[in-house]
Each structure stands twice: as C-alpha cells, then as structure tokens.
Image (cartoon, coloured by chain):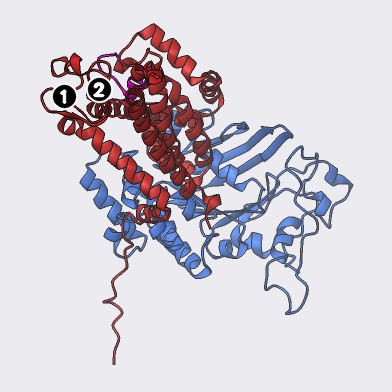
C-alpha cells in the first residue's frame, strides 16, 4: 500500500479563534452572562424607545398636565394605562424612562468613544516619543486627574451652559486622561518589543508605527477601562443632571427624572424618582459586572 | 575601490545613572560589496549596538559619541532622521534574533510585507501583493498565498524567520545586518536558513554583517571575521586565518572553549573570569585580567596593529601566526 503525503492539506487555524476563546471564558460566569444580557436588553430598549414607548415625553402636545403625579397602574382620560405612574408634568414614566435611558446611554457612549479615541492617541504619542513629549503630556494628565471629575465637569458646564452636547464635552474632558494614562503604560511595554524596532528598521513612518503597530498591541487593557468608564459616565451625567447643570429640562435623562421626583419622595409619591433610579442602577450595575468579568479574563495573572 | 561600508573609530556611549557605559569603544571595520563579515563576541561585547549604530537607531540615553560611518563613501553619522529613514530597509536592512518578536502579532503577514514595500516605493496594492508573494517564494516558503493571509502566531519559528528575511531582502539592499538570526532556531532549520541567506545574498550581490557568538557557524560561510571584546574589535582578518591561527589570546580562548575540541571526558577549556562590567571600564587592555599572557604593559591599551594577510590585532603580546590552536 502506498501512502501519499502530498494530498495532506495544511491545516489553517480558524480565524477569530482568539475572540471565540475570549467569549468562552466570559461565558463561564453565569452572573457576567446575565449582566451582558441585561446590558444588551437596556441598549435594545434605548434604541427602540421611539417605537415602543407609549408616548413621546419630549412632545408637549402629547402630555396632559391633568394626568400629573398619577400612581402606577392609573388610567389616562383616553384609556392609556400608566404602568409606572406619571411625573409632575403628566409624563408617562415608562416612556420617560425609556427616553431617559436612551439619552443617558447615548451621552455616555458618545463621550466614552471620543474620550477613548483622544486618550488612546495622546497616550500612544507620549509612549512612542518619550522624553519631553511624554513628560508634558503625562503632567497634564496628572493635573487633570488630581481634580475630582465632578468638579471639572461642574466648572466646564458653568462656563459652557446647558445642553446635551455640552455634557458630552464635559464628560470627554474628564475622561480622556484615564485612557491616556492606561494606554501609555501598556504602550511603554510594547514600545520595547522588537517588532517596533524592526518596523523602524523598515523605515515605516512614525505615524504608521504608532497607530498601526503600537496602538493595536497596547489596546486590550483599554477595553476594560472603557467598560467601567461607560458606567462612570452614566452616573456622572446623572449626577450633573440631578444637580440641574446637565441636560435641558425638556429632554430629561434618568438623572433629571430622579431630580424631578426627588422633591415628592417624602410626600409618598415615590414612583417619580424610584423607577428612574432603578433603571439607572440596573444600567450601571450590569455594565460594571460585564467590565469586571472582562478585567478578570484579560488579566493573565488570574488565569488558572 | 572604496569599501561599501566603512566604520572608523566608532564610539557609542550610554549615560546611565550608574555611570557611562562605553558599549562600543573605538570600532573600525570595513565591508566590501558582496562580502560576508562575521562579527563575533560574547553577550554585551557591543556587536548588536554596532549594528544599530549603522542604521542610526541608537536611542537615548545612548548616543554616538565619536567616529564615522561611511556608506558608499557618504557619512551617516549626524544625518537627519528623514535621510536615515530613506536609507533604512532600502539600502541597509536588518534581520533580528527572535522571529517571534520581530513580526507584529496583530497584523497579517501580507500587511507587514506590503507596508515594508510601500515604505520606499509607490506601487499599486495588487503589484505590492504580487511582490510580497514572490518574496516569500524566494525564501523557500511553500503555499505562499496561505502564509500571506496568516498571522505570525500561525507560523513556525523557522517560517517566521524566513518571512523576516524575505522582508529584509525586499528592496535588494546593498547590506544586510543579521543580528543572530538563527540563535532562536533548531539546528536543522538553522543550517537551512543560513544556506538560503547565503544563496540569496550571493545572487543579489548583497553584503552581509552576520552578528553571532557561534564561531562554528561563521567559519562555514563568512569571508572575514571581526572578534569583539568589551566594545572593541580585538582581532580582524580573513576567516580561515583568524580561526585557524588566532593572534589574540581572547580569540584563542574562544576557539578553545568550543565543544568537541578536546578528547572525550576531558574537562572543557574555559576562559577564566567574567567579561568586565561595561560601566566605567578601567584603562588598559580590557581582556588583561583574564589573559594568560598579560603583564605590566597591558595597563595601557594596545592599538590596532596590522599583520600580514590583511589582519589586525589589538594586543601587546599576540601569538605568532604560525602557532596552531592548542
């Protein structure tokens, strides 16, 4: 019998096997899986808000001031059931929470994405060039991080005024420094790797080496930081809106809804602040749980 | 004819908190077009730093303190980064020791080969990919299309080093600096890679500086050899002469400590002591404390002395050329 060796195909490993492995490890924790499902659900609800909400809380024509402060389960004049009650403007709280969640997540996600991009670029530049460039950038980061985030955001909003875009700007300016510092740390390690030296020997441009070679390799720790920072951004936005310097009163986010209902808490009208608070808590908790799990599986020291 | 590369009195120093490290302390050597020079020495003798200095890649806290590096008759020391970049990869290329580390783990092979091409030439994406494929074929990689779309971790060590060599030879450089390119590989793969590289360089007339600590490897294919010790070249000459009848006691010690030289069961020959710390080297011959021939004169540093047959040696008490290795 003759055996042919030529017909043996070369095995080519499946692409994306790294992501698959990551997913398997992630799914080993039921809590994290549930949290991820929660995050997905919240995002789906926020995205679908205009189609699933019983009324548009931003459209004053749809609100009936006569329906204000109705308890959960009450009916409106035209037969609409307010499952979670209404607030002092007569807004259906289910709709207000859906829209509020939409706004909160939008603000947090936008701010995180932009802050991540700025921080990653600035941190990579600092790590790549080192020396005086690094010193100047990192001292700015240090100064930034030595002030409480809420203080910087408050001052900025006091200068810029109210508005969704202003809140995003404020969140970006308090968050980019975290990313810059994190990526600088991991980029400094990668910077010393031989493939960077090899890329320099090949005369690749500094921009190409930084953003094509250094940044992708230094990026993974940022994923964890970003997840946690989304939760921080949501709570910071809620805090700012609660304090009345965040989003405008006509487009309430979760924080503003809580602030609106806060005054009625002691009069027994608990639902106006309670349910938006619950939604906020669920969002922050779910995102944090996902972030924690990501941090666990990406930390090689915790590997069994 | 002027040599392709001429290094004259090169000094590279690193100022660290503990003191001044003279990593390269007055190295002079020359490489002709198409020639293979073996640069031999122990770890920390300054051979790799010499390689990086040629490419202008000495990073702070290091700096080229003195000396000249002339490539095709033109001075490289003091050139701007932009000018040096125009030369790197195109005229002078480099192959590194560990192929695991020199390919970027997150980029596919084709991306990495193509960007090395486009760093110096404006070519279409399709033409660049075709050249990348040809380059892999040239270094003996089977099924190049599959390899091109693979990531570095999907290739074996030998395969990765072939890719690294393919990248180094893309622009048919006049000089390739190979920094221990086979040290991390199996012996069988090692000889394949060496043979391949030798053939490719001979074909394109590329000169080669082969940095290694493996004397046996060098004896096989280098034209000339330079032996470094503590940042200086202690002996230089045609490979057969230097390895067959070393003049410098250090070269003699190195050859003596090769495995397989003595009778079975006999203790291995060693050079006593350790290489000196490169920080604040004492004046005089750096090898003197370990040298069996050292005496009072060795307290002052010997100069390069020319010997017949195109050899130089840096020693007050060189062996006679006719003495064979004990």
Q: Whole-Å distance between the Cαs marked 2 and 1?
A: 9 Å
Which chain gets the blue colouring? B
Check the image and report above or below for A217 versus A152: below
* Label placed on residue A70: 2
Is residue A256 part of the magenta span, yes or no?
Answer: yes
In the rendered image, residue B25, in percent from the top left (x then y), is placed at: 68, 39
Q: Residue under circle 1?
A: A76
State the residue lying farthest toward the right: B296
Structural crowding at the residue carrying mark 2, measured as other residues with C-alpha within 10 Å and reported as few (<14), some (14–19) or many (≥20): many
- Residue sticking out furthest to the bottom: A1
Indicate left or right for B44 with A294 as reference: right
Element carrying mark 1: loop
Answer left or right for B162 relative to B12.
left
The residue positioned 43% from the left and 38% from the top of the image is A288
Q: Are marks 2 and 1 in contact (CB under 8 Å)?
A: yes
Q: Colour of chain A?
A: red
Q: Earlier in the sequence, mark 2 or mark 1?
A: 2
Q: Chain of mark 1?
A: A
Indicate the quadrant where residue A175 lies: top left
The spot of residue A266 in percent (x, y) is 41, 19
Residue drawn at point x = 25 percent, y = 22 percent: A70
In this rendered view, identify the residue nearer to me: B309 or B214: B214
| Residue B254 appears left or right of A303 | right
Q: Is residue B277 visible?
A: yes
Q: Quadrant of the N terminus of chain A?
A: bottom left
Residue A230, image quadrant = top left
Residue range highlighted in magenta: A248-259
């Amino acid at each position: 019998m003759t055996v042919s060796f030529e017909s043996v195909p070369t095995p080519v490993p499946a692409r994306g096997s790294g992501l698959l492995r990551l997913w398997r490890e992630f799914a080993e924790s039921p809590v994290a899986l549930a949290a991820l499902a929660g995050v997905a659900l919240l995002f789906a609800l926020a995205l679908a808000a205009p189609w699933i909400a019983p009324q548009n809380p931003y459209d004053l024509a749809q609100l009936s001031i006569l329906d204000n402060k109705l308890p959960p389960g009450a009916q409106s004049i035209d037969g609409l059931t307010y499952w979670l009650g209404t607030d002092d403007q007569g807004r259906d709280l289910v709709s207000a929470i859906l829209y509020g969640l939409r706004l909160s997540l939008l603000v947090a996600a936008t701010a995180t994405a932009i802050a991540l991009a700025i921080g990653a670029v600035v941190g990579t530049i600092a790590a790549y060039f080192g020396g005086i460039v690094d010193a100047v950038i990192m001292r700015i980061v240090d100064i930034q991080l030595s002030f409480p985030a809420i203080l910087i955001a408050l001052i900025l909003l006091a200068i810029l005024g109210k508005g969704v875009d202003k809140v995003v700007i404020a969140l970006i300016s308090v968050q980019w420094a975290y990313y810059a510092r994190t990526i600088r740390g991991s980029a400094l390690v990668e910077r010393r790797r031989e493939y960077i030296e090899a890329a320099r020997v090949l005369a690749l441009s500094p921009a190409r080496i930084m953003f094509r070679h250094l940044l992708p390799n230094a990026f993974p720790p940022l994923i964890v930081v970003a997840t946690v920072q989304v939760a921080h951004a949501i709570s910071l936005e809620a805090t700012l809106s609660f304090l009345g310097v965040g989003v405008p009163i006509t487009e309430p986010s979760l924080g503003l809804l809580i602030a609106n209902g806060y005054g009625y808490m002691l009069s027994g009208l608990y639902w106006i602040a309670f349910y938006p608070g619950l939604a906020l808590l669920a969002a922050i908790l779910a995102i944090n749980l996902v972030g924690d799990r990501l941090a666990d599986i990406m930390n090689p020291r915790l590997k069994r | 004819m002027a040599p392709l590369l001429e290094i004259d009195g090169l000094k590279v120093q690193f100022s660290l908190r503990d003191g001044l490290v003279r990593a390269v302390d007055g190295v002079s050597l020359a490489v002709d077009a198409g020639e293979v020079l073996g640069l031999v020495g122990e770890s920390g003798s300054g051979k790799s730093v010499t390689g990086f200095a040629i490419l202008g890649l000495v990073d702070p806290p290091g700096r080229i303190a003195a000396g000249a590096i002339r490539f095709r008759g033109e001075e490289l020391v003091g050139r701007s980064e932009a000018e040096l970049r125009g030369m790197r990869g195109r005229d002078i290329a480099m192959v590194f020791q560990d192929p695991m580390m020199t390919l970027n783990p997150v980029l596919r092979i084709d991306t990495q080969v193509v960007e090395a091409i486009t760093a110096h030439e404006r070519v279409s994406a399709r033409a660049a990919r075709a050249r990348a494929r040809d380059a892999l074929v040239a270094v003996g990689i089977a099924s190049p299309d599959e390899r091109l779309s693979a990531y570095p971790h999907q290739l074996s060590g030998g395969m990765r080093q072939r890719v690294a060599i393919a990248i180094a030879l893309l622009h048919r450089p006049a000089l390739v600096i190979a920094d221990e390119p086979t040290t991390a590989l199996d012996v069988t793969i090692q000889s394949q890679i060496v043979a391949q590289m030798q053939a490719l360089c001979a074909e394109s007339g590329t000169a080669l500086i082969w940095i290694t600590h493996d004397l046996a490897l060098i004896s096989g294919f280098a034209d000339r050899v330079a032996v470094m010790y503590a940042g200086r070249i202690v002996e230089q000459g045609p490979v057969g002469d230097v390895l067959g009848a070393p003049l410098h006691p250090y070269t003699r010690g190195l050859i003596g400590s090769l495995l397989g030289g003595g009778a079975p069961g006999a203790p291995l020959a060693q050079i006593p002591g350790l290489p000196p710390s490169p920080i604040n080297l004492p004046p005089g011959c750096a090898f003197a404390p370990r040298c069996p021939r050292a005496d009072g004169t060795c307290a002052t540093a010997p100069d390069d002395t020319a010997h017949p047959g195109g050899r130089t040696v840096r020693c007050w008490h060189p062996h006679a050329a006719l003495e064979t290795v004990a």
